[in-house]
Amino acid sequence: MDRRRIDMQILARNELFAKAEPEVVAAAYDMATEQSLAAGGILFEQGAPARRLFAVFGGRVRLTQCTEDGQQVLIRYVGAGELAGFPVLADTPHYPVSATAVDAVRAIHWDGPAIRGQIHANPVLAGNAMAVLGRRYEQLQTRLRELATENVEHRLARTLVLLVEEAGERVPEGLKVGFPISQQELAEMAGTCLHTVSRTLTGWEAQGLVGCGRRRVLIRDIDGLRAVADS
């Protein structure tokens, strides 16, 4: 199967193109520009003009945000089949986050006016775009609520469960996060500090829930971890 056909199958499963006709997906794919990045390469930077929407086909992208005092916060990871640069859908002037390649990334991108023109011309894409933005807003509200009302153990457990659901790999010992991730990055995602993450993971390791190594997290008991997340 050729690359174009594989890419279009991936794109058709993306939330922006859900239930779109094949010719609509093909037209969007053909008007995009392919882009490759090595690990550490930058798709876009926080505060830069939001000019392009990206679809990732291979590799993983880290979305981060810097606070006014210079602290970096990890927002989420974007993997194959997902989009980055959502502000372009709403014609927002600037990117609120930076997007950096975790490993080798292959993606395509659309200029803002071009993809918005496609969306405006197709009711299915227009509805999907509204739904995408609505889900992102809901996710933001959920994260704010969790930070305000839930303890660190719940947030960290939920972060790990989400990571293995999105990028988990089955190994003899359990499930591992399928890309390198540090305890500092886990702390940023869970809204806490490195010391608290280290102490919590050590306790969970003693209970047989997880196993930890350098930039490596192994989930030994996913049901037990889900129970912590939901308790």
Image (spheres, rainbow, N blue to C red):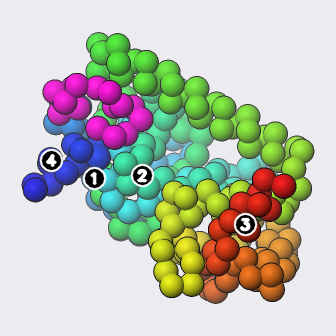
Q: Amino acid at mark 4?
A: Arg
* Dot 1: element: strand
Tell me the residue that label 2 is attached to: 43
Residue that sits furthest to the front in the current view: 223
Cα distance between the residues tagged 2 and 1: 9 Å
Q: In what quadrant of the picture does the N terminus appear? A: bottom left
Cα distance between the residues tagged 4 and 3: 38 Å
**Which disc is residue 35 wearing?**
1
Could you tell which of marks 2 and 3 lies nearer the N-terminus?
Answer: 2
Do the residues under discs 2 and 1 have CB atoms within 8 angstroms? yes
**Which disc is residue 5 wearing?**
4
Q: Residue at x 46, y 48 (%)?
A: 44
Image: magenta residue range: 12-26
Q: Amino acid at mark 1?
A: Gln
Cα distance between the residues tagged 2 and 4: 24 Å
Could you tell which of marks 2 and 4 lies nearer the N-terminus?
Answer: 4
**Which disc is residue 225 wearing?**
3
Q: Find residue 39 and report its horizontal and vertical position in percent.
A: 41, 69
Q: Amino acid at mark 2?
A: Leu
Looking at the rendered image, the disc whose residue lies closer to the viewer, 4 or 3, is 3
Instruction: Give 94 or 210, whichever is nearer the viewer.
Output: 210
Is residue 18 shown in magenta? Answer: yes
Q: Find residue 164 and report its horizontal and vertical position in percent.
A: 56, 64
Could you tell which of marks 1 and 3 lies nearer the N-terminus?
Answer: 1
Q: Residue at x 81, y 45 (%)?
A: 146
